[in-house]
Amino acid sequence: MAGAAEEREPGPAVGEQLQEQHVACQVFPERLAEGKPLRGFISSLSKDQKCQLMLQKTLETNPYVRLLLDAMKHSGCAVNKERHFSCEDCSGNVSGGFDSSSSQIVLCQNNIRNQAHMNRVVTHELIHAFDHCRAHVDWFTNVRHLACSEIRAANLSGDCSLINEIFRLHFGLKQHHQTCVRDRAILSILAVRNISREVAQKAVDEVFESCFNDHEPFGRIPHSKTDARYAHRDFQNRDRYYSNI
């Protein structure tokens, strides 16, 4: 099944997938023109307000995000809503990105469609932020580092949940989750790097086993919000255990 996906030519299905991609470590040229991040300089107030409201709900209620926020704080990289998130209009079909130059998550308010979409984007980008915090990630010159974080984000964020795959009309057989993670990691790399599909696929293949099995900070693959809640509870208990040693 992975082989069939790799040979697929770009078309409407791929375009739809790219629209949902949560782009990692993308430096937005217009944000660097002034030497500092800009907040929605071409956005309308109504879009910004909607984005901010959905973001607030995600931060307060989504179990994936709540665990990641605790993990970031535990790792010495506490997240501040005003400092580390920016709702902006983005070019193309990008939904969001992690700007490693400013340690800021960009949320594309003109492309994020609803609350569920916001939940996935924030979760995906927080996994990149967590990787940036805990490891010396070379986002720009080492495609294997990028591939690893994209594998982890696709694996742990719910991007490849059964319900999302059904909406994409992808019905899997054996190891479908792994196939989905691999395909979406490749698509994410191609969305931010001017490289061939073969190079992106090779990078993903080289690091897939180790990065797919790296479940931090969840400790498991959270296939649902219930799984994420249990993972968050276990993380909090683990944190309490180590703090008492």
Image (spheres, rainbow, N blue to C red):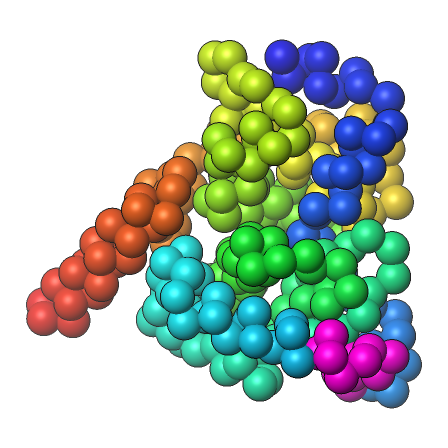
Judge from the rendering whether residue 143 lies leftward or rightward of residue 151; answer left or right.
right
**Residue 2: x, y in percent?**
64, 17
Q: Give coordinates of residue 231: x percent, y percent.
A: 28, 51
Q: Outermost residue toward the front?
A: 46
Quadrant location, the C terminus: bottom left
At which x and y percent is residue 179? 58, 23
Q: Main secondary structure of the magenta part?
A: loop
Q: Nearer the viewer, residue 196 or 138?
A: 196
- Percent from the top left, x then y, of residue 36? 78, 85
Q: Is residue 111 above or below residue 14?
A: below
Q: Please state the total of marks drawn on the protein image.
A: 0
Seen as rendered, the residue at the extreme left is 245
Instruction: Say whether residue 148 is visible.
Output: no
Q: Which residues are magenta?
A: 36-48
Rendered residue at 55%/42% (across/down): 159
Which corner quadrant holds the N terminus? top right
Q: Quadrant of residue 35?
A: bottom right
Left or right of 63? Residue 57 is right
Q: Is residue 81 visible?
A: yes
Q: Look at the image and say whether residue 176 sits in the magenta stretch.
A: no
Residue 237 to residue 165: above or below = below
Q: Quadrant of residue 75?
A: bottom left
What residue is shown at x 62% (from left), y 58% (from top)?
Answer: 114
Q: Is residue 39 magenta?
A: yes
Query: Considering depth in this image, is 176 or 62 the residue closer to the camera?
Result: 62
Q: Residue at x 75, y 59 (%)?
A: 111
Residue at horizontal 12%, vertical 63%? Answer: 241
| Of the pair 112 and 184, the residue shown nearer to us | 112
